[in-house]
Amino acid sequence: MPIQPDRRTFLKAAAAGASALLAQPFLHAGESPRATKPNIVLILADDLGYGDLGCYGQKMIPTPCLDRMAAEGLRFTSCYAGSTVCAPSRCCLMTGVHTGHARIRGNDRVPLQPEDATVAEALKKAGYSTCLIGKWGLGEPGTTGIPNRKGFDEFFGYLNQKHAHNYFPEHLWHNEEMVELSGNLGMGRKEYSHDLFTDKAIEYLRKPHSNPFFLELAYTIPHANNERGTFEGNGMEVPDLGKFKEKDWPEPEKGKAAMIARMDADIGRILDTLVQQGLDQETIVFFSSDNGPHHESHCDPDFFKSSGPFRGIKRDLYEGGIRVPMLVRWPGKIAPGGVSSHPWAFWDMLPTLCELAGAACPHGIDGQSIVPALFGGDAPVHPFFYWEFHEKGLQQAVRMGSWKAVRKNPRESIELYHLEEDPGESRDISGNHPEIIADIENYLKTARIPSEHWH
């Protein structure tokens, strides 16, 4: 079990951090975001919907720590995942390209290649120490795509995303070595992977760092263990249901609520550790999810209104499948309580982090930095956002300004929605706007390059 911080020490550190915060004015548009290279912490949930957090409208699952993060930082309302399932979304985040250009466009076991530049590689070249804890999914053991060969100095977690379904695995990976979890051997269920990830992250933050660091903490919550759900009826694995045990809810919903509450509390521990270590003012923290909410292991995304006001879930290219929460916190630099409707996507993360870190950004990517938007300024907006998805044929989606187009199959017509007037994508108005459809059809002719794995 992690050591609990002494309360007096914690309050002293918190008071010192607050004093520093008050003494330092927040940045304004056009000002330099860094005097020195900031530490960067990127926390990623798995299958967490836009509407699963209190700060995005959730009413049934309390998320006080993430709500506090939103109150102390900036909340984006138009941030998009790289894809509507795990592996391609993470590929877009790591490599700065959308799914029309990405190496990985689905959940097949395709590894990143040496020529696929990652954000970890870019930051490492700029002098950063780099660490990944949690789920990877972009390269199997021994391939060119494992984290230690794609820029991470240290890795602890799952390589295979199907293995990541199991919250009580018999082994995990530390760098390139398989580590046995003795408490989970046989029928054992004593070592919950999410708890191990939180403890490892706190351990990493407490270590002395001579260089700025980039820590990616990729939780698997609230993904379902689909194998367990198939046999036992509830794949929402969590050591205990806590305060949700007595709720008059279906068991999978109790499990999902307990998972999200557990993650929220542990993110609170991460933020508190930054204060305790005197790193709060020097560290920018991002929180998001890799795609929309799932309908797996008997879990009903409508129960908690997990997609928020949007249509669709995981495996859809409607907004509910790809629009995700995004919180950014940097005390003393980013003004608290901000809300931004600036649209951006996971492929913008690489150039954004490179600019924050003063790192050289790889060429030939689709992403563009949104750093000005973090400090209240105007960042450039993509003329087109593009997604494709390859289960049950080729699905495609395009956002152009406030227009959103969805094509479920290349042989079908394009659906068109106006997101400002119809955020729930309930009224297809393609017949009223042939000129918009023509612009989108012309863009779709050049939106993707061929892939040997996804045709």
Image (cartoon, rainbow, N blue to C red):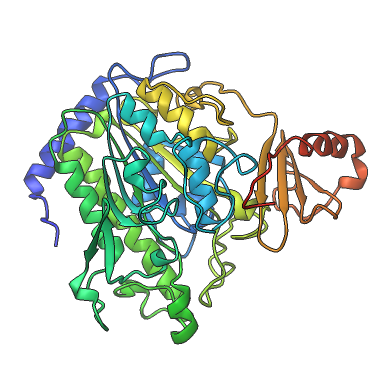
Identified at 15% across, 40% down, the residue is: 276
Res 378 → quadrant: top right
Residue 326, image x, y percentages: 48, 43
Q: Nearer the viewer, residue 233 or 302?
A: 233
- Image height check: is 40 above or below 228? above
Identified at 89% across, 39% down, the residue is: 433
Q: Could you tell whether 324 is left or right of 150 in the image?
A: right
Considering the image in quadrants, where does the N terminus appear?
Answer: bottom left
* Whether residue 309 can be seen here: no
Residue 116, image x, y percentages: 48, 37
- Image height check: is 24 above or below 292? above
* Whether residue 58 can be seen here: yes
What is the number of callouts on the image? 0
Q: Nearer the viewer, residue 238 or 341?
A: 238
Identified at 76% across, 49% down, the residue is: 406
Q: Could you tell whether 268 is left or right of 380 in the image?
A: left
Res 353 → quadrant: top left
Q: Residue furthest bottom?
A: 232
Identified at 34% across, 32% down, the residue is: 330
Residue 10, image x, y percentages: 13, 44
Residue 111, image x, y percentages: 47, 50
Q: Nearer the viewer, residue 351 or 102?
A: 102
- Image height check: is 341 above or below 313? above
Q: Could you tell whether 303 is left or right of 143 in the image?
A: right
